[in-house]
Amino acid sequence: MITGKILKKRGWKEGRIIGLAKMAGHALEQQGLDEAAILDRLDEVLAAPEKFTAEKPFEELAAELLKRERSDASKIADTLLAEPLGFQTWGADFIDGAATQQMSNAMSLPIAVAGALMPDAHVGYGLPIGGVLATSETVIPYAVGVDIACRMRISIYDASPHILGQHKGKFEKSLSEQTKFGMKERFSPRDRPDHPVLDDEDWRATNFLKPLRQKAIEQLGTSGGGNHFVEWGEFELTAPSPELGLGIGKYLALLSHSGSRAVGFKIANEFSRLAMSLHPKLDQVVKHLAWLDLNSDAGRDYWLSMELAGRFAAANHAIIHSRVSKAAGVKEVAHVENHHNFAWKETMADGSEAIVHRKGATPAGQGVLGVIPGSMADPGFVVRGLGKVESLNSASHGAGRKLGRKAAINSLTKLERDRYLQERGVKLLGGGLDEAPQAYKNIDDVIAAQTDLVEVIGKFTPRIVRMADEAGNY
């Protein structure tokens, strides 16, 4: 019987490869080979796996050995570049210097290949919010963020926005009863929504993901705290849009902002911890930007987990819009949605493939529609991407904060916030001072700073806004 101990003495590495070698050895034993012959044959596979990729029973073992070889060959030292790579900034006049420095630090990573800074940028963990970073064959969990697949969705209805004033109580009730905000809020088991994402086979792909499915069941169709919202408003389509199939005019609309809740939060924390443990010598200034090699098991597991979190986040929005629309008695005729905390495999200008991390940035490839919100009382915009290479086909994901949460709470008053809302005809359900509109940059300035990145095709004006009562967890 070929054991792992025997194989390790002959130079085999621990892990999945030894398991596959033992399986191949067992198959050879069934064919009548003795131990010495089996070990000699396995040594041949170890020495030249490329020769055995199509030979039974070695195909899977050979493929895993080749994958490990590629991974080992692609390992990069943790030493930062002597000079950071250059990057272009939009809206530099209203971006804090600390956010620009964070982006510069990220561009010093040995895996960095390109970057850009959006006009809503402000300081984050590792990569600034509003930062876009392309890397080679690696993914950075913290450059995606803790709220994986935080995203936007706008649903548009073939109805006049005037009905919001005519049936205000019905629309307020639809938000109050059909949305749940914050860490502890969820639907009762008998009222709990269902969605095909809960049957996704990837929940069973790793031992780490298996228990997260229960958290997904509990939180499906709910929103987090902080800046997450669901709001009724008026959408004005100002430019022709064959994609939406609608004429220029004003429509009733529902806009939402939330992500993958505890599922994404736990994935982000687990794989960020793992990435940092793999790069203990990385400079402390960029320690949160530790990476995972996509040719490694950890990198592949994170990528699978991230994409699952993305599907779960999309399902959350779909459930929210379905429930709220049904309660209000309206039917969607068009919608636009997009992630803005995610990583994508994309082709760069030179034809190479890179991993593009958008941490608080909207995909804006040529012709791609996206949503850029303002604040609880300021307009948001539906935009069409112009495919700007220098921005890595990206745009801002919102207005961007000019006051941190503590600063907003300490410097703004409820009277100031409510007067701002009243002047703009906005009814707020919930919402803490940390999300007061005065805590955000001027959305019109942010949009004006990126006219070469996106074209505005429609404007959303909030009327009834539902948020968590105060900053919360995922």
Image (spheres, rainbow, N blue to C red):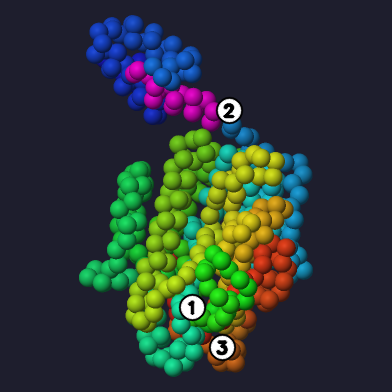
Number of other residues with Cα within 10 Å of mark 2, as a class: few under 14, some 14 to 19, many 20 or more: few
Q: CA distance from mark 3 to mark 2?
A: 57 Å
Q: Which residue is mark 3?
A: 421
Query: For this rendering, which residue is in front, 316 or 360?
Result: 316
The residue that appears at 60% across and 74% down in the rendered structure is 458
Q: Foreground mark, 1 or 3?
A: 1
- The amino acid sitting under disc 1 is Ala
Dividing the image into 4 quarters, which one contains the N terminus?
Answer: top left
- The amino acid sitting under disc 2 is Ala
Decide which of tag 3 and tag 2 comes sooner along the chain: 2
The residue that appears at 33% across and 70% down in the rendered structure is 186
The mark found on residue 168 in the picture is none
Residue 414, compared with residue 441, is above or below; it is below
User: Which segment did they paint magenta?
Assistant: 56-72
Q: How far across and down, in percent of the image, does residue 232 sit?
A: 47, 81
Q: Which residue is mark 1?
A: 253
Residue 124, compared with residue 239, is above or below; it is above
Give the image quarter of residue 239.
Answer: bottom right
The mark found on residue 73 in the picture is 2
Q: How far across and down, in percent of the image, does residue 353 sit?
A: 61, 41
Q: Does residue 141 appear anywhere in the picture? A: yes
The residue that appears at 55% across and 75% down in the rendered structure is 247
Label 1's element? strand
What secondary structure do most residues of the magenta stretch adopt?
Answer: helix
Q: Foreground mark, 1 or 2?
A: 1
